[in-house]
Amino acid sequence: MGSPPRTDDEIRTLVAAAASELATDEYSLLSWLGRRAFRELAARYEDLVSGYRSTRALLGDLDTVIHREVERLYPEAHSPRFAIEERAGQLLVHYASDRGLVAFAIGMIHGAAAHFGEEFTIERVDDGRDPTSACLRLTPVAVEQPGDSWRPAA
Ligand code: HEM
């Protein structure tokens, strides 16, 4: 077995190879990985995540609390920057990182939503030309609760 990938270029090469091997595209692979990663990270860093009750609250604290703590624990870490805006019931999430991992970020947000029992459709609303920054629009999808019913109880 070789050593783990170290540089962003090595990771990009791996993602491209894995996507081709799995007959999928890089967007699908990265967003799937992001969704899985949220689950793993939320379990591993339970103390950091357990205080949050919603995707919105967690996203609002990514730069100031969560990734800041990651950088404190791992000084070599290189976190993305996020800014959140609320508009007419929708959330705008601005992402910026030299790593250009927007698809991974989308998967992480879907993973966070699943964690909180929420669901969003996520659309990229910038022109998509710059891989190092993106603006995502999150629209809540009503999630049916197990006991939901529109009929009055008999
Ligand atoms: C919805 C919530 C989250 C989003 C959207 C998100 C997004 C991302 C993205 C896109 C990256 C890739 C690096 C980049 O693009 O520059 C990343 C890295 C990372 N995130 Fe998050 N993240 C979230 C929550 C968390 C949580 C809860 C943890 C755990 C406490 C965490 C820990 C990390 C770590 C360890 C890295 C790798 C940093 C490095 O090695 O340089 N993230 N995150």
Image (tube, grey):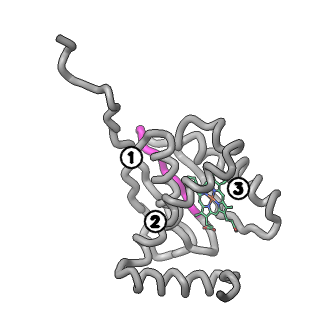
Quadrant location of the N terminus in the rendered image: bottom right
Choose the circle earlier in sequence order: 2 or 1: 2
Cβ of disc 2 within 8 Å of ligand 1? no
Q: Residues within 10 Å of mark 3 (few under 14, many from 20)?
A: some
Q: Which amino acid is tagged 1?
A: Thr
Q: In whole angstroms, how far apart are the C-alphas of marks 1 and 3? A: 24 Å
Examine the rendered structure and indicate whether residue 20 appears above or below residue 82: below
For the residue pair 74 and 59, the one nearer the viewer reads as: 74
Please name the residue that numbered disc 3 is placed on.
67
Q: Give, as a single range, the part of the protein colored magenta.
A: 88-95
Q: Quadrant of residue 78?
A: bottom right
Instruction: Give the prevailing secondary structure in the magenta stretch.
Output: strand
The residue that disc 1 covers is 139
* Along the viewing direction, whichever of 63 and 125 lies nearer the viewer: 63
What kind of residue is marked 3? His
The first of marks 2 and 3 along the sequence is 2
Q: Between disc 1 and disc 3, whose residue precedes?
A: 3
Asked whether mark 3 and ligand 1 are closer than 8 Å, the reply comes as yes
Image location (x, y in percent) of residue 152: 20, 14
- For badge 2, the amino acid type reads Ser
Report the residue marked by disc 2: 31
Query: Which quadrant of the picture is home to ligand 1?
Result: bottom right
| Residue extending farthest front | 1
Q: Is residue 140 above or below residue 137?
A: above
Rendered residue at 61%/37% (across/down): 52
The CA span between labels 2 and 3 is 19 Å
* 150 sits left or right of 48 in the view: left
Question: Which-is-in-front pick, marks 2 and 1?
Answer: 2
Q: Position of residue 141 (x, y in %)?
A: 34, 42
Against 82, is 54 above or below? Answer: above
The numbered disc on residue 73 is none
